[in-house]
Amino acid sequence: MTPLSFRSPPPWVSRALVILLLLVLWEILGRMGSQLFFSPLSMVATSGVTIFADREVLEALRTTAWILAIGFGLSVCIGLVLGLAVAMSRFTYQTFLPVLLLLYAIPQITVLPIFVLYFGSGPASKIAFGVSHGLFPIAVSVVAGVQGIKPLLVTSAISMGATRWQIFRRITLPYLAPSLFTGMRLASTATLLGVLLAELYVSSGGVGHFTRRFGESFQPDKLYALIAALSLMAILINETMRMLERRFSRWT
Amino acid sequence: MSAASAAGQALTARLTPAQRRASALVKLSALALLLIVWHFVTVTEIVSPFFLPKPADVLRNFIRIVGSGQAWPDLKVTLFEFAIAGPIALVAGGLVGFLVSLTRYGARVFEPIISSVYAIPIIIFYPISVMALGIGPESKIAHGALFGFFPICLNTIQGFSRVDPLLIRLAHSTGASQRQLFWRIMLPAAAPTILSGVRLGLMLCFLAIIGGETIASIEGIGHRVVWYAEGMQTGNMFAYIVFVVLVAVIMNAALSLLEFRKGRS
């Protein structure tokens, strides 16, 4: 609102400068601080090249990506069905929505050991734990989406002689799309959180194994490189989902 | 497919008394059924007690763990970590959020950076905390504070940037000073958004601490669950999980209360 005395550059230019500044700061602080815990950007980058040439690390990352994809897919399917079931009628909505919200309120991290007990320490427990994180945002968003549909639309469809399937196909589904995509964006980060939590907890294989190995042997450069790669993956997933969300929100 | 919509009625519309009774009955009988099935499969040992302890055993263990004060030392550690990490997250998040929102331009530059970092599951930074600070409380405090920082910071930015410009113009035209503008207009208008960020941030901070304890620790309530799990004491593990969930629920309720109280004043 306040007029500036100079013309400020467009926000993205300043944003790029800020990021650059942070990276430079990382390099400088990394050279100053203890090399045991901290590592300058340049070293992390060179280690990044070596660890991503390592077959085992690549294999672990690929496994994590697979687990994430399966977990996310299952979350969407189960969450969608669950959400539609809860929003099926006024009765089911008011009976089961409180139950859904109650289950959502239980912090999943506390039940992680049960998941490992039941699903073992392989990919299954990681997938299941990822689903336990991704399922609820989808279900709740779907319920909210159905709830937001104007009853008038449905009433007029009925008066024009629409069948249930037609109502579902022509009204419920298209009007649901924006909230479904919001739910999917939330679920993608939540599933990733769940999968990584399980990976770090089990840590016998996969990414968790390497974070533990690099951490315990005090190889910060490798640890940072691995974490930077995972962070980039998370940001990319989030941005992709945001793009999809924007695109499909325009649809209705 | 969607019968509510088929009836052309809003899902939130009130149920008839008969439907309300039926709804309560469905919920109660579902819970009862769950307990009966649980009891049945464990008593007959269709499911090994190693995988699923009897509900009565879980209850007995729960009473013993909570009643004997056995849980207290671990709870004290966790609460201590939270008592330090929470305020750090609060002050750092609020301060950064405030500084960034001093100008509209600052908010436009920094908000996307902070929110895309927030998209990273912060848990993956935990191994760094452990490497640098060890498996004692320090690493949990750092991790919890980092987790709590983002929602608080982002909501502070959002709260300040969504203050009605008309209010600000009004304050300017009545000759309000910068301080008056902040205390009388900006802060009260932004408070609800900031407070919901504070609630969320502190809750995430608390859960992150429990998560950190679960992954790598030697004490704390999150660690005790793992300790029982690794000792194959499934009965105690289930009871302790009930305890931890209860602690989290109470924490959540307490934090919601704070938001409600402050939101009104």
Image (cartoon, coloured by chain):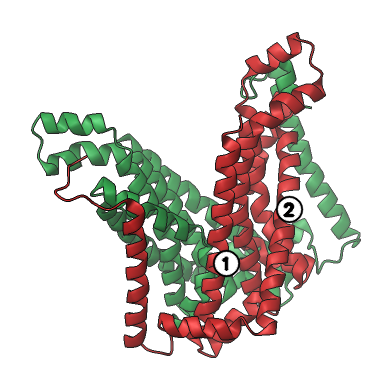
Chain colours: A red, B green
Read off the residue under disc 1: B68
Categorize mark 2 by other alpha carbons within 10 Å: few (<14), some (14-19), many (20+).
some
Which amino acid lies under the numbered mark 2 shown in the image of this protein? Gly
Categorize mark 1 by other alpha carbons within 10 Å: few (<14), some (14-19), many (20+).
few
Residue A167 location in percent, x, y? 75, 22
Q: Quadrant of the C terminus of chain B?
A: top left
Decide: is A4 above or below B175. Answer: below
* Camera-nearest residue between A208 and B139: A208
Q: At 82% across and 18% down in the image, what residue appears? A: A163
Which amino acid lies under the numbered mark 1 shown in the image of this protein? Ser
State if disc 1 and disc 2 touch (CB < 8 Å): no
Residue B201 location in percent, x, y? 43, 54
Decide: is A251 above or below A224. Answer: above
Chain where mark 1 sits? B
Residue A252 location in percent, x, y? 61, 29
Read off the residue under disc 2: A73
Q: At 85% across and 59% down in the image, what residue appears? A: B42
Q: At 64% across and 40% down in the image, what residue appears? A: A180
* Camera-nearest residue between B34 and B113: B113
Q: For numbered disc 1, what is the local secondary structure?
A: loop
Numbered-mark total? 2
* Camera-nearest residue between B245 and B211: B211
Decide: is B73 above or below A81. Answer: below
Left or right: B187, with B237 as reference point: left
Spatial CA distance of label 2 from label 1 is: 45 Å
Q: For numbered disc 2, what is the local secondary structure?
A: helix
Left or right: B87, with B147 as reference point: left
For the residues tagged 2 and 1, is the chain the same? Answer: no
* Camera-nearest residue between A239 and B179: A239
Chain where mark 2 sits? A
Q: Is residue B230 visible?
A: no
